[in-house]
Image (cartoon, coloured by chain):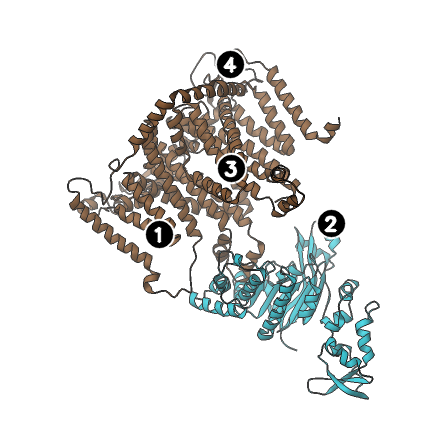
Amino acid sequence: MSETVIKCESVYKIFGQNAKKMLEESNGNVDAKTFQEKGCIVGVNNASFEVVKGEMLVVMGLSGSGKSTLLRCISRLTDATGGKIFIEGQDLLELNNKELIELRRNKMGMVFQSFALLPHKTVVENIAFPLQIKGTNTEESINRAMEMVKLVGLDGRENYFPRELSGGQQQRVGIARSLAVEPDIWFLDEPFSALDPLIRREMQDEFLRLQEKLQKTIMFITHDFDEALKLADRIAIMKDGIIEQLDTPANIVLNPATEYVRKFTEEVPREKVLIIEDVMDASIKNNLGDLKVSKDEIIENVAEKILTQENLVGVIDSNNNIVGSIKPSKIIDTVFGGRKNGS
Amino acid sequence: MEYLKKYPKLFQWLFLLIVFFALCFAIDVPETYKFIRGQAEFVKDPNQSVYFFLGKEVRYYAFDVFWRLPPLLGWLPIWINDSLFFLMNEWMPMEFWNEDTQEFKTRPLLLQISRNLTAFMTFLIELIREILLGGLETIVAFTSWDFIDAYPWLELPGLPWTIVAAGAAILSYKLSGKGLALFAGLTMIYISIFGQWKPSMQTLSFILVAAPLSFIFGLGLGIAAYKSKRVEKALYPILLVMQTMPQYAVLVPALVLFGVGDHAAVIITMVVAVPPMILLTILGLRAIPPEVIEAGRMSGCTNWQLMLKVLIPTARRDILIGVNQVIMVCFSMAVISAFIGAKGLGFNLLLALNQLNIGLALEAGLCISLIAILLDKMSLAWANKQTDYFGNLTFFQRNKNVIFFAASFLIGIILAYVGTFIFKGSFNYLFEIPHNKGISTADFWNKGVDWIFDTFFVYIKAFNTWLIQDVLQPMRALYLRMPAVATLVLAVGAGYLIGGIRSALVVAALTLFIALSPWWDRALVTLYMATFGVVISCLIGFTVGTLCFQNKKSAAFMLGVCDIFQTFPSFVYLIPVMMLFGITDTSVLIAVIVYATIPATRYTIEGLRSVPVGLHEAATMSGVNKIQRLTKIEFPLAFPHMMLGLNQTIVFALFMVIIGAFIGTEDLGQYILKALSDKNGAGIGLTLGICVAFIGLIFDNLIRTWVGKRKKHLGID
């Protein structure tokens, strides 16, 4: 198991006066309704999870579900009302202001939904901003910023002002800025939500390409379930401040934990999400036909091939060892069956 | 009954008006009542009633309480005055070290503070003044008079005007470009050639101290208010009153506290210029999107870095408007503070106006307006400047401005030196063109004025007589005919109908203060002049604004014109009207109208502009024509913003009415002007100022409340 980077232990965020006192009195049994009657709004309710190095955790929820609040607790833009948050083993809530600033200057980067670029600075100045705040000299920070400009493909526009760029370009600047200090932890708060669908898809691919290269530890917030499925290593689905389910995309699609989660998964084209490993039978490794497929293939890509077979199809890992098998009828089951009655 | 149900508000208003007029007719004018029987003057007269309060004797003419309320607040000015004197001369005496006499001396604390502050301001002003004009006060401040006697060559010679002109042009070029540089150069050359150099530089040195100090204090206090609710709550009422307080009124207490001269003028300018700066700073900081602040935090900003590198630059737009306001107020005060002994163009302007030398006044006014426009544009350009990191520049290119300045510095000195040979025995025109020794167009203008008078005298006179006899006098009489109770009922009723109990109480308190002061009659006269000005201004501004709005270019042009006119110091407006109409109420009213039309026009255009494009398109697709679109879509939606313009128009009109006292009117301003030359004037001046401010605030409160409700109703903002 690789190293844990972010760790939350029953984190609460409650807005309103006396929030702290009410939380203590409730003994961890926070009910949003009773709190609301007393003038408090529950933002995050008992969130516990870990994110390991290089992992991308996508927090998905509709507006008002507390996903952004959770992110702000972990970046300590707001102070959590209760619970503990550890960043690489350091207790975040115990840090004093100076240590917090050090942490942000060196370890964290964040991308915002509305881009949050500084209107008075050019593209390159915006990207160099975190470096200059750190005290890097002008020449070095501008050079580094130019590297970032190239990384996100904005060469030639470095002297533009944010207002002169399209939404997609502005968010590239936002991404470049958040990466300028080479942070280990990368927070993205609905980075693509304000973009057109086509641009959004393009940016998602670009983002995956970047992550392939950079291997950051990521918390990604979105309200788009498809986006979550496409990007995530694991997905946390939030509702009313509570994490309803936290699992890999495949498990969420195959085994939704609650009725709420099921509603999201119902319309999902499984063949596009699941890989062979998710549906294979690991117990049967004999009597296989000629065709072998890799366990990491997405079902959609191999479905046609498998469906032409009459025998069991063998499933192999990257070393060509047989790890299981799959019946052609199982593919039909996965794609067409199970949507209504679950699997 | 149908209508009653449909428009309940309308009937409430009608009812209010009926009550008002019923009261007006029911209460007769007392036989003893004559306007301006000197309610405010403390002349003893056996007909007067007397009461004592807090040991102060207040004399007044008693009337029926329904007609005029007794001046129960008559003690306030006397009390303020006594308190000020007590604070300055007796409160907290302490031992202070005296540099000159080398011994301790007992002095009241406040007096000492005021002296120190004064000395500091004087030093700053003198420093800049001596760089521009030469002198030795600054060096004396560091050394002593004996020292300067021993080394007379230490006296600063002052910069030749050529260098200052070149410097201004080069700075403008660096900040903005060729256009502004040309303007700066021409302005400076104009000032010099027309012999206004010395007073202009005196005014400039005053501005260069007052404006930055006001900016820093305003920004600082604005940030403090943004950070702390408590500071904001403490500041807010003061800001509100200061916004509508006429600039004249603050002069009088300043006289008592800081004495006469440029330093007092700077301090008083700060008092006037800081409040709008604070308000705009708060406004700008509040409007910053929260994500931008979070982005700053996540970049690892300390609190200072966040403020200086993220918050202030992001709020730049509003802060810039603040800077613009500061500069505007500074120039306005540069003229007005000539009343308390500030030197410079303002003093010349007042002197010329006093002597009815319109030509001279025009020249001084033009100079001050040109400098105002120049500084305004320069500050704007400064805030919008950006750096180029990638230009591969040579040493010369990078430092060309410094090199050019150094070169022009040398050339300027050489020219000035050469000048000593050319102009032997007379003034060295290449060093400084003395006052009144340049080209003067004063005669030309004066002749022009005479010509206008000779040619059009009959018409002007006829117009004047008609306006005064048939419009102004009856209107004034009507205002004075209002019984105090009727006015109160009208004001409070309007407050209640617009904003409910809260507004009614606020309006009642403000109106009562004025009614209980000794100057109710004067306040009515002020109100009548302001009303007349506002009505005409609004008609003009509204029409011009609507017409200009029909075309994008003309709208932009008009806004530019408004910008420039707004930069003129308010006093300058008196010059042309005095040219045409001489010393009459008409002059004041026309100045009021011209001045107050600026915000009326600006807000009309801005309001119409703010109507969303989507609605335009929706309207066009519904097949409306231009006029229908204006009346059905644009006016209703732009109306709230236009009402805010009305608010500004009222404030502007009040300001100008008060300033008009200089020409001679019978309103509150006249008393403020009187208080200036009165030893005990501080209390009177301040109370009068508050009265004027309250008139403004009554309308401010009503209009803002209405606009707030209306905007909510329309779902804009």
Residue B590, compared with residue B430, is above or below; it is above
Callouts 3 and 2 on one subunit: no
Q: Position of residue B207 (x, y in %)?
A: 37, 42
**Quadrant location, the N terminus of chain B:** top right
Residue at figure coordinates x 58%, y 34% from the top left:
B703
Instruction: Report helix, strand or loop for mark 2.
Output: helix
Q: Position of residue B398 (x, y in %)?
A: 35, 61
Q: Position of residue B265 (x, y in %)?
A: 37, 37
* Sequence-earlier tag: 1 or 4: 4
Instruction: Report helix, strand or loop for mark 4.
Output: loop
Left or right, B403 with reference to A343: left
Q: State the brown chain.
A: B
Q: Amino acid at mark 3?
A: Thr
Q: Amino acid at mark 1?
A: Leu
Q: Amino acid at mark 4?
A: Tyr
Residue position marked by numbered label 1 in the rendering: B171
Residue position marked by numbered label 4 in the rendering: B33
- Which colour is chain A painted? cyan
Residue at figure coordinates x 61%, y 24% from the top left:
B489
* Chain that bears disc 2: A
